[in-house]
Each structure stands twice: as structure tokens, then as C-alpha cells.
Amino acid sequence: MTSSNPIVSGNTISLERTIKAPVELVFEAWIKPEHIQHWWGPAGFTNTISQMDTTPGGEWVFVMHGPDGKDYPNVMKYKELELNKKIVMEHTVQPYFCMTVLFEAQGNHTCIKITNEFESAEMLQQIIKAVNAAEGLKQNIDKLEDHMHLQDLAISMEVNRTFKAPKLLVWQAFTEAAHFSKWWGPKGCAIQVAQLDLKPGGLAHYNMQMPNGAIMWGMFKYIDLQAPDKIVFINSFSDADGGLTGNPYLSVWPLEVQNTLTLESQADGTTLLTIKGYPINASMAERQAFANMTAMMKQGFGGTFNSLDHHLAVMLAQGKTPIVMERVLNAPVEKVWRAITNKDEIKQWSFDIAAFEPIPGFEFSFKGGKPDGIVYTHLCKVVAADECRKLSYTWQYEGFEGTSLVTMELTAQGNQTHFKLTHSDMENMQIENDNFAVDNFIAGWTNIIHTLLTNYVENKN
């Protein structure tokens, strides 16, 4: 968007806006009744079109229905129309004005320049005072932008799948490199994850080695994350350097596809996954290619989700798959190390711990549990500590048999820290208690790492 506010000068109102749609589609939205009826007019107005002849000398006859319940008859007479470049039309009922719209292709976006010329500056000021014409023009083009977005959604691809696993486990499979690499991609390919930075603006960068030995790179750019319910990301083909590349199999294909993935827990304990994708910044030919391939894409996701089904079953089997969570924290590694090893800092963001020393053999304990449930005493012993790099300790519950292992690994990345948590050996804790189910551990660690620790180290001075 290059300009959001109209400019009033003398007897004209002008506005310039860059629309995220190809010029052919934007121009079509101005000359076809099935489009313009949905967006013409200020906010709250609708339209009934009785005639639309866009040839020079032809008329566009319509009624605008205001939010106040009143009807406003309108007639536009076309003076010029140059395909994908220019429209000039006169409003032949009061208030009289001439509208000129210029269209300029900017890659797969379109810059539109609108000028409304009135009979006089005095007349324009009267209209602005009566109906706020400048704001009306702005709202009108806001509605055009919204309509263009709906055209993207109209060619979207949607896949729904129910998995026999709790929502948090499915979230983990999508957001942790150790799991993502086990199931993503076409059947038979091997995935290597080079980067997975789970935050808005972060990237997941990976390569896929196909059965024939060919290597392709892919990339996610995360737009919105609402753990464990929703992920919005832009998917694209990539290269080893993280650049955008075209589809290696199709010469005409969108460079970027925006996806919204949602997870919903079902009453029977399963999880409904919905993923909806549509091309962005795409040409008309690329949009059409995407629309033509939706059936094949759904088939491809079917195979990929079969692999996810299998991996989720493995994750659930006796809890033998470790819980692995990773996060890039916007804090230096020394600050993160203090947060997880200094008892006074631990108390500020985590459990109320009486004593802690990052020394192998040091034993510590704390109480924890759901606010409305039973509180359990956790018994732990430090088994490894490498300052600013690694902390490991055993984890068990007072009164229950079995010991698991928690490992926190820190890697400095400039003024940021890559934090990785692994909770392993959970199969040793053979506890017949729903509170110790794997999804409860995942929920707990998700809150601890992605909310409590993140907020503490990124916001503490």
C-alpha cells in the first residue's frame, strides 16, 4: 500500500494505492458487475446494478443502498477504456464529477491512481462537508483490497484430516525439527531440517532428498503462531542459501503460497487438522495453474498425512519418543543460562525452588501440578552442567517409581540463543495416572518454554 489517504487539491480528490493482485484481476474488478457490486462505495454500502456497458459512450446504471436504509441512484458514462491501463467515466447525476483511474502493473501487484475532478473547488468543498467524499473514496478502495483478497481465497486449496492423537502431540509434530523431519514431504523422501525458528517472522528451512537422489529445498516463513491451535505460514521452494526459487517441476507456479493450519480437539480424543492455502503475489497464469492443481495437491497432502499418522502412532507408543522443543530466544546466552540456573531467577518465571546449583550431583526438588489438581513433588539431580551450553538433570516424582532425563542445550547466535529442551527416557516412568500422560507433559513444557521462559528472558532488563 503506497498511500492510504486521499489528497484534496483545488477541485480534485486523488488517491494512489498498490493492490496485492495482478493488474488483469484488478482491472476486471472494475469492469465486471459480479465483482464491482461487492466493493463499490464507502463502508456499509451495497449495490444493485441494472446496466453496465463499459464501451465508450456506454452507461453503468446502479443503485447504492446506504447503511441508513436510503437508496442512491447513480449513472456513470464511460468516456475511455484501455484494457488493463485506464478507465475514464463521468458521473452524470449530481454530484457531477469525472473519474480517471490509471492502472500500472508492478510485478504481480497493481498500482492504481484515481482522480475525481469536480465542477469547481467550491463544489468539492460542499460535497466533502456534506458526505466526507475523501474518506468515502478511501473506504471504497479499502473494500476493493478486501475483495481482491477474497479472490485469492476463492481459488484456495483446503484439506481436512482427523488424527488419532491429542492436539498437543500433533502441534509438536509440526513445530519441532526432530519430528517434522520424520514425516513431511512426499512418500519416500528424506528430510533434513537446516533451521526451524518457531516465531512470527522466523523460518523453517529444509531439504528433501528424493528416492532418485535429487535434492530440493523448501521453506516456511511463519506469519502467526497461536500454540497449540493455529499456524499461519508462507510456503515456498527454496535453495541451500534460503532464497526463493521456482517449482522445479512446473514452469508456471506461484513462488509463494500462504497457508493457515488449525488444530481442534475432538470429543473422542482425536484432533481435526485443517489446512487452507492460496497463492500470494501471483500472476494470473500462476493463479490459474494453482487452481488447476488443487485436486493433485490434496492427493499429495493425503500421502504426507499418512506419514504423519504413522509418526504420531510411534510418538504415542509407550511414550518412548522424547519430547523435544526448540526456540530462538531474543536474549544473549548468558542471560538465558542465569534464568535456568540461578534459584532467585528461576522463582520469578518458573517453580518456587528452595535451592539450586548447576553442579553434577546437586539434588533439588520443587512442587508442581495443575492449579485445580493434585500437586506433586518433583525430585531431581543434576547429572551434567556446561556453563552457557548444557544442563541435564534427572526427573522423578516422590512416591512413584521411574526416572526420566531433562536436557537443556543452549547455543549462542549473536545476541540471541537457540534453546533446545529434550525430555527423554519417559518410558521408565510406568505410572498409571492420567496426569502423567505424554500430552500433559507436552502442554507443560510448551507453556514453560514458549511462554514463561520466553517472556522472562526477552522482557527482563
Image: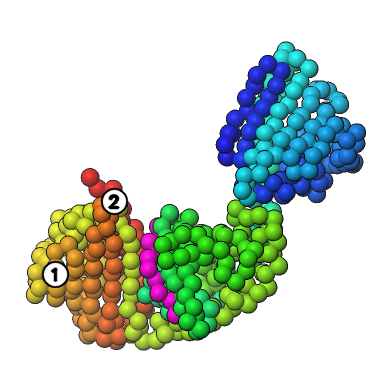
Screen quadrant of the C terminus = top left
- Residue at the spot x=72%, y=12% of the render? 122
Is residue 297 visible in this depiction of the protein?
yes
What is the magenta range? 190-199
**Predominant secondary structure in magenta?**
strand
Label 2, residues with CA under 10 Å away: few <14, some 14-19, many ≥20: some
Q: Is residue 366 above or below residue 269?
A: above
- Residue at the spot x=62%, y=25% of the render? 7
Q: State the count of labels.
A: 2
Screen quadrant of the N terminus = top right
Q: Magenta includes 194?
A: yes
Is residue 347 visible in this depiction of the protein?
no
Q: What is the number of the mark on residue 307?
A: none
Q: What is the number of the mark on residue 458?
A: 2
Residue linked to disc 1:
385
Q: Is residue 208 above or below residue 11?
A: below
Query: Residue 221 in the image: x percent, y percent?
Result: 47, 59
Could you tell me how far apart the alpha carbons at marks 1 and 2 are, in whole angstroms?
A: 23 Å
- Residue at the spot x=86%, y=26% of the render? 92
Query: Residue 61 in the image: x percent, y percent?
Result: 88, 36
Amino acid beneath label 1: Ala
Query: Residue 230 in the image: x percent, y percent?
Result: 49, 62
Label 1, residues with CA under 10 Å away: few <14, some 14-19, many ≥20: some
Q: Magenta includes 277?
A: no
In which quadrant of the rendered view does residue 48 lie?
Answer: top right
Q: Is residue 272 left or right of residue 384?
A: right
Q: Is residue 191 left or right of residue 13?
A: left
Which sits earlier in the primary sequence, circle 1 or circle 2? 1
Amino acid beneath label 2: Glu
Dot 1: what SS?
Answer: strand
Q: Is residue 188 above or below residue 435?
A: below
